[in-house]
Image (tube, helix red, strand yellow):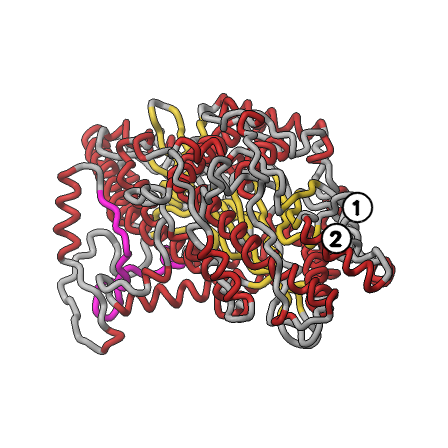
Amino acid sequence: MKRKQKASSYNEMCRLAKRHRISFKSPDSELWPALHRNTFAQICSIRDQKFDDYCADNYYGHPWRAFTKIRAKFLTRLAATLLERTANETEWRNALEGEFLLRFRAEVACPACRGRIWKSDFEAYIEPSADINDLRKRRKQRVFCHCPSYRVEATLYEIGGRRLFDSRLEHVIIHDADVQEKLQLPDKKPDQVIGLRETTAFEKLFEEFSKKFGNDDIVDRLTPFDESEQPLLLPFLILEAKSEDSADGFNKARVQTAFPIWALLKLQEGVRVQTSGDPPNISPLVWYFANRGEYWRVYGCYISNGTPEKYEIVQLWDGCVTEKDASLQLLLIVDYIFDWARDIYRPSILRMLKSAASGVAYDQVTLANDSDIFSDGQRIANWIPAPPTSPNALVIRSDVSSGSNAADHESAIPVSKRNARLKTIREAMIFHATINFEGLGAPKDLPQQHRHHFSIIRRIWATRYSEYMQRKDIDPHMINQQKQRVKELRNRACAMLKSIGTNEGTWRDVEILVFKRFDEEIVCQRCKNEKWKSDYEADPFDEEDEARLENERKDRNACRCYQNIETIRFAYDDSDDECESAIFDKAVSARLIRDPDEHFRRRYISTHPDRVLGLKMTDRYRRLIASCPPELTHCPVQGMNLLYPFIILEAKGPHAFGSFEEMKDQAAFPLRLFLELQDALRKASRKSLDPLVWFFAYRGEDWRLYAGTVVKSNLRLFDLWHGCIAFHDGALQLFQIVDFIWTWARDVYGPQLQNCLRELAWLGIHTGEGGLRETN
């Protein structure tokens, strides 16, 4: 009943957002508004920053970069620690939010010389306007600190006496009374909001308003909160957090935050339209950060041109902060937004307010020297303890709510005693089954027999769509095919993101496109040549097998029938059954064969994978299996001759209840079963076979890849890749990964299985034992 009520509430929020012209746009640069295009492009370009390359040889003159790199490394370790102990939402918030958003509280000037100790690596861009000359002048006048470098780290953690920004935690957004009564908007409490402090410059402007217009309500029109003392003015950044195991996904958090974003945009627009003369060529902009455990996203929110005006939210970046690259990128994005807020947003707000108070046109307004240096110059370094050096030494910050209310806002789903008990049972069963879930480990921590495969997956993770399209070492025809695949996948994903009524069944259509290559023929039926060549190809661990495969690949030619080029091979070797049809098969909502623990497990964990891929049963395989020992099981899916499955897929809709952790729990026992079948075949034949099963999990547009293998009789599940298919990069990476696994299944896994079966068949013929074990 509670789930139905939650779903009904969510759908009502979606309809309400649509009614008020709040929409969520696909991450497509062509749709960005002109006034924010360069700003959004700079945010997206930060995705190209790599931890290993950052500050590698450019320390001199930029000492803050080294400390940024130290912070990124620390935050990566901290996130990994939280992930390992399954931290709740409050713990994630207390540990990470304050650290990532530290720039808005930290000092930017040296207490000794008052020179700058920090500069954003990506300075905020401003469109040509009356503000640009002022900004150039201010930036030119800034003098950088030349004190000893050890001061940089200590100074960053100092608190200035005249900060420009402030924040609020879980305060209810207050709408105008008339608007609230007319629209019946729900009360919302964003986890954190950052805005402008009431500094001396604002106080003077408010005095001018009071003298000129005889009222004191100007502050009420600039804050979304019910505050009389030190109000937070015109917030520009909003943050919403969920724990890793929360049932609420990013889409639900986004809809939940839609109306607070709407309210903040309307506040900014209200100031703009009150400016004397023609409103300046400035458009409202709000930044929205969403995080779910270690996964973070950054959105840009704006008002589009047109009548009536629309309030649009577009995703610009996503990343997993257990990766050093993502932690560094998120820190640089926060630095950029801080630079934008200090150099563009705040001065433009002051000029618009001064224009409204004085009646002088915006482009004629000049600002007094209102310093953007945080502190008044006191030496207060001893007020603050030294920055943390390890995750275990973390002290919970006082500026983040540590009470139970921090996680008890309206969208959180209460965990019943029964649900807690079921979770405990699942964890105990998984532990008993010797299933170890590994995180995003370093390459040295990966199993040796699969390290070369897993390293290629990590290399694919670094692929950028824009760079891929410019590559000259790949056949242009193949690049164009990949481009079309990415386009179709993104179009489907973005269309479903915009639709209110999408569910898991709707998203399941995406699977067909992603795994389409496993359903297709390998060779062209006309010329008998290869229809596709993967960007990355898998190689066996054994050197002799690798040499054999290399020679075999040299004999393969690409199909050119699309160019009407005759390259027909009449003497085609079909020893692997690749000539006539696809060599793989699949099962959807697969029911697996029974095992002794099934009755107990079925009460707590679903063991019916959404999709399973394996080898297709052919006459050749049937003959080999008929001569194998009867105690071996080759086809673990009930009612199907699906041989030795090697891919498992679990899916959830973007609004469904259940997290990635629960999907891993669901897949744990099928993974163990499939790996045990492979391992049993290896032991019986004593031939080379490295057990490996790939596990894809996705929730809406968010996809992840894991790999299960056997190490010392234990199942180890490695976390290899995360991506968002609404982005060009994520969609391309997913296709490259699937293509790579396809080559592994064809050129490594399949031949190893055949060798094992041939050996067992030979033994069976000579011993008189063998037979195909039927599935139950």
Q: Quadrant of residue 177?
A: bottom right
158 magenta-colored: no
Give the x, y percent position of residue 125: 48, 62
Q: Which residues are magenta?
A: 516-539
**Contact between labelled residues 1 and 2, with CB atoms less than 8 Å apart:** yes
The chief SS type of the magenta part is: loop
Q: For the point 42% across and 57% down, which residue is it?
A: 45
User: Along the horizontal axis of the image, is 264 left or right of 333?
Assistant: right
Q: Give the distance between the C-alpha atoms of the residues marked 2 and 1, in whole angstroms.
A: 8 Å
Callout 2: SS: loop
Label 2 sits on residue: 223
Give the x, y percent position of residue 369: 59, 55
Q: For the point 49% across and 70% down, which residue is it?
A: 30
Callout 1: SS: loop
Is residue 6 at all visible to an observer of this figure?
Answer: yes
- Which of 45/664 is in front? 45
The quadrant of the picture occupied by the N terminus is top right
Give the x, y percent position of residue 544: 13, 39
